[in-house]
Image (cartoon, rainbow, N blue to C red):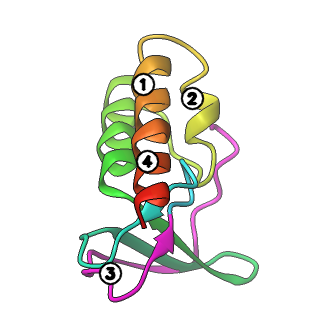
Amino acid sequence: MSDYDSPKVYTITNPKARKEHRCCECRGVIQVGEIYERYTGIWDEPDTFKTCPDCVALRDEISTETKNNYTFECLHEECEYEPWHDRFRMIVEKRKRKEVAV
């Protein structure tokens, strides 16, 4: 995560989903009506990352504990190691079940 490039400009919002979205971390479903994090920024190109509340909480905990900068779509790499591996796996399973229930 040391190769993280900060965006030139960014906004972070926490909207309520008006339609289903896919979490950029666990690839699970963000349900209609669920509050999620939307991070929009301009790196070399504009991009937007939508993250479910479960992954936001885990990512924030990992970032706080490790003092590392965070790169979107790489939470699974951080969670290859304990103590976060089982928690990330539970998030993935939880979000898969939501997808089936839709």
Quadrant in which residue 5 is drawn:
bottom right
The answer to the question of whether label 2 and label 1 lie on touching residues, with beta carbons closer than 8 A, is yes
| Image spot of residue 85 (x, y percent) | 50, 19
| Image spot of residue 92 (x, y percent) | 49, 40
> Residue beneath label 2, please?
78
Q: What residue type is labelled 3?
A: Ala
Q: Is residue 52 left or right of residue 100?
A: left
Q: What element carries label 4?
A: helix
Q: What residue type is labelled 2?
A: Glu
Report the mark closest to the observer, 2 or 1.
Answer: 2
Q: What element carries label 2?
A: helix
Q: Is mark 3 on a helix, strand or loop?
A: loop
- Looking at the image, which is closer to me, 37 or 87? 87
**Disc nearer the start of the sequence (4/3):** 3
Q: Distance between the residues labelled 4 and 3?
A: 18 Å
Q: What residue type is labelled 1?
A: Thr
Q: In this view, does 88 lie above or below 54?
A: above
Circle 4: is it few (<14), some (14-19), or many (20+) Cα within 10 Å? few
**Disc nearer the start of the sequence (1/4):** 1
Report the mark closest to the observer, 1 or 3.
Answer: 3
**Disc nearer the start of the sequence (1/3):** 3
Residue positioned most to the right: 44
What residue sits 29% from the left and 44% below the top? 57
**Disc nearer the start of the sequence (2/4):** 2
> Residue beneath label 3, please?
17
Q: What residue type is labelled 4?
A: Arg
Quadrant in which residue 18 is drawn:
bottom left
Residue range highlighted in magenta: 1-22
Report the mark closest to the observer, 3 or 2.
Answer: 3
Considering the image in quadrants, where does the N terminus appear?
Answer: top right
